[in-house]
């Protein structure tokens, strides 16, 4: 997936400034300016890869003369020992960009790998697994890209591209009916209105308000089943809150339409990827 969004160049500049600063003092001290050779980036465990376009973007920023050959595409399953990319050129350039590239690849591939594992658990059930806004500040677009690489779907990207009326909105406005009516005043006809509810009484209010989607917040498995029966396909239902690998399938089997998991991005384990100088 090619990374095309305006803030990425700012993010990349920040990452370079944060790590290299005024110069890679260790590399400058130990590696001759004219020293050149080859290197490779490899998986040290099996992964779903995500973020390969970042390899070119980082190293081209440091040294446009580096030769880079990418051996895979985002979303590919790579077995342990697979070469992700080969580089040739100045050793100093390769070493200075190493950690920045690996930080991106390890985190994004960790998200993609974890997501694919969860998607596989419910692949035979007609439900969509989606992410949330619980992402690393500044990395949301990349982390949501990684979720897609893993086979799941994106929820809204921010507060600007979807109306989700949550518990605090309802308390501030007074009730679900009034909050939904106010939202309809400014919402274009192409924008869905979703409401978060905490019990069946609120679910009834949301359905009466003719919302498009209802988010069932922290419902138990039995509560989700009751909600599905009560809604009777009059509205799309999204389960959210307290969902993890252990209970995901049970939640999917209740009959909800969507399952949103902050766990996809906020509790990820970075996978093991390394860069090795060959000569």
Image: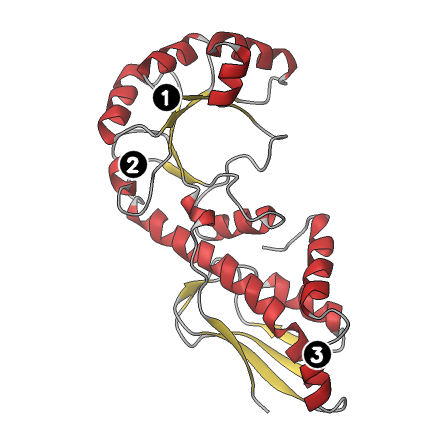
Q: Quadrant of the N terminus?
A: bottom right
Q: How many marks?
A: 3
Measured from the top left, where is residue 35 in percent x and y? 71, 91
Query: Which residue has dot 1 on it?
Result: 198
Describe the element under mark 3 as helix, strand or loop. helix
| Residue 57 position (above or below residue 116) | below
How far is mark 2 from mark 3, CA to CA?
48 Å
| Residue 132 position (above or below residue 68) | above
Describe the element under mark 1 as helix, strand or loop. loop
| Residue 8 position (above or below residue 167) | below
Query: Which residue has dot 2 on it?
Result: 252
Of tags 1 and 3, which is closer to the observer? 1
How far is mark 2 from mark 1, CA to CA?
18 Å
Q: Which badge, 2 or 3, is on the more N-terminal residue?
A: 3
Measured from the top left, where is residue 18 in percent x and y? 69, 64
CB-based contact (under 8 Å), mark 2 and mark 1: no
User: How busy is the neighbourhood of tag 3: few (under 14 within 10 Å), some, or many (20 plus)?
Assistant: many
Query: Which residue has dot 3 on it?
Result: 93
Measured from the top left, where is residue 239 in percent x and y? 36, 31
């Amino acid at each position: 997936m090619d990374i095309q969004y305006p803030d990425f160049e700012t993010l990349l500049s920040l990452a370079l400034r944060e790590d290299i600063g005024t110069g890679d003092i260790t590399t400058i001290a130990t590696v001759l300016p004219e020293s050149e050779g080859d290197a490779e980036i490899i998986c040290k465990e099996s992964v779903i890869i995500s973020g390969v376009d970042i390899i070119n973007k980082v190293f081209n920023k440091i040294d446009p003369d580096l030769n880079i050959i990418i051996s895979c595409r985002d979303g590919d399953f790579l077995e342990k020992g697979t070469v992700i990319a080969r580089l040739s050129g100045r050793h100093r350039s390769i070493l200075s960009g190493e950690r920045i590239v690996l930080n991106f690849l390890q985190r994004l591939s960790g998200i993609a790998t974890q997501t694919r594992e969860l998607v596989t658990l419910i692949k035979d059930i007609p439900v969509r697994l989606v992410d949330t806004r619980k992402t690393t500040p500044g990395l949301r677009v990349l982390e949501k890209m990684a979720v897609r690489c893993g086979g799941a779907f994106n929820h809204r990207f921010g507060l600007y591209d979807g109306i989700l009326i949550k518990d605090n909105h309802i308390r501030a406005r007074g009730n679900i009916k009034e909050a939904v009516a106010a939202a309809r005043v400014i919402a274009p006809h192409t924008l869905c209105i979703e409401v978060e509810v905490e019990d069946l009484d609120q679910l009834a209010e949301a359905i009466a308000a003719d919302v498009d989607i209802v988010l069932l917040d922290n419902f138990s498995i039995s509560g989700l089943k009751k909600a599905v029966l009560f809604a009777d396909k009059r509205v799309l239902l999204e389960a959210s809150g307290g969902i993890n690998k252990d209970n995901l399938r049970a939640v999917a089997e209740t009959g909800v339409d969507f399952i949103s998991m902050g766990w996809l991005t906020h509790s990820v384990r970075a996978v093991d990827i390394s860069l090795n100088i060959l000569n």
